[in-house]
Amino acid sequence: MKMGVLGSGIVAQGLSARLAELGHNVVIGTRDSEKLRGWQSSNQKVLIGSFAETAAHGAIVINATNGAGSLSALTIAGEENLADKILIDVSNPLDFSNGFPPSLTVFGNDSLAEQIQRAFPMTKVVKTLNTVTARVMTHPLEVANGDHHVFVSANDPDAKAQVIELLRTFGWLHIFDLGDLSTARGAEAYVMLWVRLYGTLNTSMVNIKVIK
Ligand SMILES: NC(=O)c1ccc[n+]([C@@H]2O[C@H](COP(=O)([O-])OP(=O)(O)OC[C@H]3O[C@@H](n4cnc5c(N)ncnc54)[C@H](OP(=O)(O)O)[C@@H]3O)[C@@H](O)[C@H]2O)c1
């Protein structure tokens, strides 16, 4: 499948590499292609594009841009290039302006995922993977042999089902359907706990399992 990954950071790089490894046709998007030249030399199956080229390429597009810049990045990507497509949103609305730990730029009765959905009503936003570190997103079996959960929130059931299938190809065994996109408020706010777990455990290779 044609996949467009918006972002040049560790998350976009990891997702792009994994998608290419799984046989997808991947373009990774940035405002500054020079940033990715070194990485691409060892990931030659992935092409580099602008945000707009990347969004236009993808049948599915992934938002792996900084949360504080995501609305801006998606605006540059272009509403027309995102219309009628699934947008997998893995971003977190983190504010590091006061150092570590960060705070949230949006929380309570709203979420970044919902802000994106309101700004791009023709796009099917699916929130997922934001609750784990980049490596675990694409290699979940490396933590407890996959015995832990990832969450999915979306308004469109078909889009959600397609993303769940994609997550399974990454190796995810336990995929928790939280419900509509408003449930991303919880998944985004959870990251405040995740950063504390990271600070205490001294590893980012950590996740949670839901039991009842
Ligand atoms: N790091 C993790 O393990 C992890 C885990 C879970 C979720 N996340 C979330 O995943 C996202 C990506 O994280 P990351 O650590 O890979 O990278 P990052 O440093 O948070 O984001 C880098 C990307 O954001 C874009 N960007 C930053 N400010 C922008 C602005 N004002 N306008 C447009 N684009 C802007 C950059 O564009 P250019 O390429 O053009 O510079 C770059 O592509 C973040 O939302 C993060 O919270 C990260």
Image (spheres, helix red, strand yellow):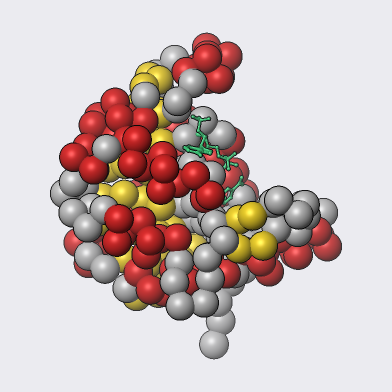
Work out whether residue 141 or residue 49 is closer to the camera in this orientation and state it.
49
Q: Is residue 25 left or right of residue 28?
A: left
Picture quadrant of residue 82 = top left
Relative vertical location of residue 209 with respect to residue 137 in this rendering, above or below: below
Give the answer, above or below, for where 21 lies relative to 158.
Answer: above
Task: Check the picture and name the quadrant holding the N terminus.
Answer: top left
Left/right of residue 144 with respect to residue 128 in the rendered view: right
Q: Position of residue 32 (x, y in %)?
A: 49, 21
Location of residue 94 with respect to 49 vertically, above or below: below
175 lies left or right of 194:
left
The quadrant where residue 31 appears = top left
Q: Residue at x 29, y 61 (%)?
A: 118
Question: Residue 48, located in which quarter of the rendered image?
Answer: top left
- 107 to the left or right of 118: right
Residue at position x 40%, y 28% from top? 29
Residue 77 visible at all: yes
User: What x and y, as percent, mark residue 162?
Assistant: 26, 55
Q: Residue at x 45, y 46 (%)?
A: 70
Give the total of numbered labels: 0
